Image (cartoon, grey):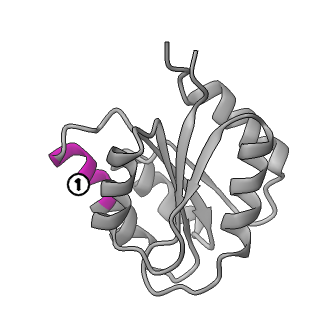
């Protein structure tokens, strides 16, 4: 079996990527293949990277307050590209009141500030399927 492949991305104008890099490293250290796309990515760039990399999941880190728009567009573009099977998850400064809305649009999991790397890794292992 191939390892799980995850694209970790920082969409929008947010320039703070320390958390995304820490999560990317934790996932990689747990045996997953991780591609970090860097700062200031558009949903279009993120979806293109996910498809090109044959990713099983996309993890978005959003601290800018534009999470509803950025997650929604990413989920929509994946569906448009016949890639709705790619799991979308993320984290950042996201109000609890918005988590239900994000889940309703297809985001599988939102991790808030202070979530342990162990919790993220364990969730990824349980919820992002292994390829055969």
Q: Is residue 61 left or right of residue 74?
A: right
Residue 64 lies in the magenta stretch:
no
Quadrant location of the N terminus in the rendered image:
top right
For the point 64% across and 83% down, the residue is 16
- Left or right of 10: which side holds 103? left
**Where's residue 11, x and y in %?**
45, 73
Up-down relation of residue 113 to residue 13 (above or below): above
Q: Residue at x 45, y 81 (%)?
A: 40
- Of 38 and 98, the residue lying toward us: 38
Q: Residue 112's spot in the image, x, y percent?
A: 69, 61
Total of numbered circles in the picture? 1
Q: Nearer the viewer, residue 91 or 96?
A: 91
Image spot of residue 108 (x, y percent): 49, 42
- Residue 32 percent coordinates (x, y): 66, 37
Nearer-the-camera pick, 101 or 18: 18
Is 99 in front, or is 5?
A: 5
Occupied quadrant, residue 92: bottom right
| Secondary structure of the residue carrying numbered label 1 | helix
Residue in view at x 40 percent, y 56 percent: 101
User: Which residues make up the magenta segment?
Assistant: 74-80
Task: Name the residue beneath numbered marker 1.
Answer: 77
Residue 79 lies in the magenta-colored region: yes
Q: Main secondary structure of the magenta part?
A: helix
Q: Is residue 61 above or below residue 107?
A: below
Write the residue at 58% across / 31% down: 4
Report crowding for label 1: few under 14, some 14 to 19, many 20 or more residues within 10 A (C-alpha): some
Q: Residue furthest left?
A: 80
């Amino acid at each position: 079996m191939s390892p799980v492949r995850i694209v970790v991305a920082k969409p929008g104008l947010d320039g703070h990527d320390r958390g995304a890099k820490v999560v990317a490293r934790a996932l990689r250290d747990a045996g997953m293949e991780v591609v970090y796309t860097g700062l200031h990515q558009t949903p279009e760039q993120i979806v293109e990277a996910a498809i090109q990399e044959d990713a099983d999941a996309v993890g978005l880190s959003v601290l800018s307050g534009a999470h509803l728009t950025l997650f929604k567009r990413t989920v929509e573009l994946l569906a448009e590209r016949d890639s709705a099977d790619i799991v979308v998850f993320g984290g950042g400064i996201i109000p609890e009141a918005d988590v239900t809305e994000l889940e309703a649009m297809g985001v599988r999991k939102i991790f808030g500030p202070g979530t342990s790397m162990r919790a993220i890794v364990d969730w990824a292992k349980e919820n992002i399927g292994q390829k055969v």
